[in-house]
Image: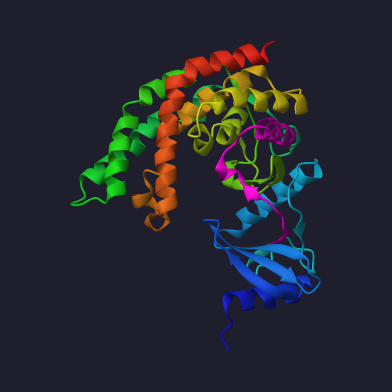
Amino acid sequence: MILSEPERIADALARSYGVHAVEVTEIRAGTVTINFRVVDDTGCRWFAKVYRGELERERAAIELAEFARQGGVPVPEVRRTLDGQLIDERVPMSLWEFVDGETAEGGLIGARWPAVGQVLGRLHRRLAEHPAAAPTLRAAAGVRDVGRAWQSFDRIIDGYGNRATLSRFEQWAWEAAKERRGLLDRAGAILAGLPELTVQVVHGDLASPNLMLCGDDVAAVIDFQPSAPRFAAWEIARIGCDPRTVMLGDEWISGLPELLIAYRDEHPAARVDDLVSTVAAGCAYTVASTYPLAQPFDDPSAVTPSLELYARARHDAALLMLERLAEVQDSLRDRLKR
């Protein structure tokens, strides 16, 4: 007898976790995992994540999430298997407490700015203690290798140029890539003009889909990457300058300082240079990034209407940040150096 995917999940839950599911419903979210909402026979809700990638990498990501949770960061609790494992390798999947809320894809507004800043500051304060790497200072040019970015843009620009026909999105992506390639020197100059910035263990993918909100409060930080040192300013920009927020209007210019002040209150060791450099680092990184302009080549199956909308928002946000950069940096410097 061939089991359906929900039946297979229910069987694994009983066998490996002692959880007896009465409802297993797929959640249409996530790009590298298949996710399910589970209700057990006691009425308790769970979140089951089925993996399609390298399990050692996924296990390392769960371990980092656990480390953050132990430091008071709102991270869902992972339930171990009956024999104490983080992942049931036979499926393979992990099981988490279910968190009510919605992702931050609607953008940051109002009281969400300081709420997100507080949680982000707590997260970075905790991850600065991670044994994988102590915080250190590095040249800001490391935020994005602009030399390699030239090669990346040339690859996709030439690739589109060699296609006999282009879809509407591919035609737009081709033009956007040519426009952004023309801005790479400016991106490199922005990074060269910044002071040395802090590199430490970070979440690794802290964009709006991975931040759960309940009203204006942060309900959970989800989907960590394995522990690796990256620029703290870059990660702050991932959420504080998320394209979905920037394209809502000018509130991001006044809201970002509120996020950073709350961040510093929660993480007093944070350096002002890192905070003031947030928009510059995020702007240069986004200008010099080919994602998702390159998806028709790198992962055609990932090109969906929602990804196309995100691509356009990310491009427009990069240009807007570049246009307003001096103004926003002056504002941040004024607020944070008082």
Q: Quadrant of the C terminus?
A: top right
Q: Is 233 drawn above or below residue 336 in the view shown?
A: below
Q: For the point 75% across and 71% down, which residue is it? A: 40
Q: Quadrant of the N terminus?
A: bottom right
In this rendered view, identify the residue nearer to me: 227 or 96: 96
Q: Quadrant of residue 20?
A: bottom right
Q: Quadrant of residue 177?
A: top left
Residue 9 lies within the magenta run: no
Residue 108 lies within the magenta run: yes
Q: Position of residue 89 (x, y in %)?
A: 65, 67
Q: Is 193 drawn above or below residue 93 in the view shown?
A: above
Q: For the point 34% across and 51% down, which residue is it? A: 296
In this rendered view, identify the residue nearer to me: 196 or 123: 123
Q: Quadrant of residue 233?
A: top right
Q: For residue 168, say whether it is visible.
A: yes
Left or right: 69 in relation to 295 = right
Q: Position of residue 302 (x, y in %)?
A: 42, 55
Provide the residue span drawn in magenta.
95-123
Q: Is 147 drawn above or below residue 162 in the view shown?
A: above
